Amino acid sequence: MQAATGRLVIGVDSSTQSTKVLVVEVETGRVVARGRSAHTVSDGPGRESDPEQWERALRDALAQTGVSERAEAISIGGQQHGLVTLDAAGRPVRPAMLWNDTRSAERIPSLLDALGGPQEWARRTGSVPPASFTVTKWAWLRAHEPEHAAATAAIRLPHDYLTGRLTGEPGGRGTTDRGDASGTGWWSAQTQAYDPEILGLPAVDLDPALLPEVVAPGQPAGTVAARDGLPLRDGALVAAGTGDNMAAAVGLGLLPGTPVLSLGTSGTVYAVSTTPTADPTGTVTGFADALGDWLPLACTLNCTLAVDRIAALLGLDREAVEAGGDVVLLPYLDGERTPNLPRATGLLTGLTHDTTPGQLLQAAYDGAAQALLGALDTVAVSGSGVAEDAPLLLIGGGAKGTAWRNTVRRLSGRAVVVPEQEELVALGAAAQAAALLTGESAAEIARRWETARGTVLDPLPRDEAAVERISGVLEAAGALLEPEGDRKA
Ligand SMILES: Nc1ncnc2c1ncn2[C@@H]1O[C@H](COP(=O)(O)OP(=O)(O)O)[C@@H](O)[C@H]1O
Ligand SMILES: O=C(CO)[C@@H](O)[C@H](O)COP(=O)(O)O
């Protein structure tokens, strides 16, 4: 890489599978160095990661860049929703329960009832909380591990935890931002503050003093004060950071009218909206964005990892897809959130003697992609200005794959734009950090950096037959996907 001469900032993406760090030149947006370090996630009934491992991964990834100590500001984008519980000394009480841990689904019916039903949750918070949301995880912890709940002196989201490790949380009050706060379930989209009634529900019973301060868009969280071996400059500015999807929206300089499809551990589809949204069906969560607008979003639990797993089971390379056949594969290996089937398992139907392994793999791509594309109409609410034929911005690790690109084109019938820049979450975080130095808005900076520039792939005729096959199987599957008594727990 060319030597760095200008002012530098750091953007971090602490996502489910890894930490990615970009060192970016403020003036030009040029990425001058990068680092990456993997995380481990538990398997078995839950999905957990050790927050201290994220910090070690951050240290490794920063050190790999070789220039991190030159940066004047840093910001963290992180996987949304995870419940990080800290004791009075600021150490994790237990591993974090992640966004894709569905054990807390059992708490949802009573939480919904306690506030007056899904409609009321949507009206207040913008979302009907799925098992991903922090509020359901906290309710689960109180019910199953009361000793851990009692030992909790502070609650943080993954990005808040890392921000706090940088700033040292002066006065013990950590920070978050409106985007990530809007995925907790206890932040009100109406008042844009924590909701005392939700925090006071018997199943939640959470003292707001345990929660971080919600920093206003564009304001810093503090300065680097607690380096603890992190290769950063003392006194460098720390931006508020945000959830990874909000960070990617910033990183793309996203404006209303452009839908985004992100293919990573999670699949997400979203657009910026100038008005708050409230979908009482729960398909779309009405998040806030990081900058003062809104980010209606649908998310699946099974995307690139699930498809890669099916390819591995078949002994195929992930690109070895074949067209044809009538097989349908719903790859709900981790339960699913869209559609909301937290205890579902994968379902395969339509096999014949003629079915080839490549067709089975293609069916896995189709099942994963259609779950997201089917939610696009609900994301395209008024305020988001998304037209029926608006091209889709395709991002995330999966966007590098030809099979993913072609599946999205074939099932959406839309043109697809794949940005040249691959790490949009980290770039968005870098833009947040740069905004602290220049006084511009982070999205303006990203637009100045031309981060959304990329290859345009023309639309393919929409494969209506495949879309209908998938919805037909979903409708007919009933109890196979939603075990009896699922919603009564
Ligand atoms: N060249 C590629 N083609 C298709 N998929 C890819 C390619 N490279 C990486 N991936 C997929 O990207 C995924 C990781 O994407 P990423 O957006 O980094 O995930 P996350 O942010 O959830 O950790 C992997 O699960 C892998 O399947
Ligand atoms: O739960 C959601 C969005 O609501 C996920 O999108 C998480 O934010 C995890 O993101 P990745 O690690 O897959 O990027």
Image (tube, helix red, strand yellow):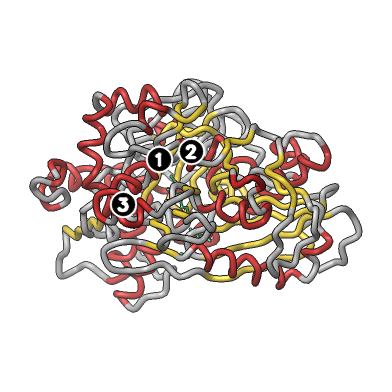
- Name the residue carrying label 2: 270
Tell me: residue 461, above or below residue 402.
above
Percent position of residue 411, x then y: 38, 46
Q: Earlier in the sequence, mark 2 or mark 3?
A: 3
Q: Earlier in the sequence, mark 1 or mark 3?
A: 3
Q: Is residue 36 left or right of residue 198?
A: right
Q: Rounded to the nearest whole Å, what is the CA distance between mark 2 and mark 3?
A: 30 Å
In the foreground, 81 or 479: 81
The residue shown at (63%, 32%) is 291
Instruction: Sort mark 2 into few (<14), some (14-19) or many (20+) by Cα contacts within 10 Å.
Output: many
Q: Is mark 3 within 8 Å of ligand 2?
A: no
Badge 3 is on which residue? 141
Position of the N terminus, as image quadrant, is bottom right
In primary-sequence order, the first of circles 2 and 1 is 2
Which part of the image, by quadrant, shows the C terminus? top left
Q: Are marks 2 and 1 in contact (CB under 8 Å)?
A: yes
Residue that label 1 marks: 298
**Percent position (x, y) of residue 106?**
21, 47
Amino acid under disc 1: Ala
Tell me which residue sits at (45%, 32%) in the image: 187
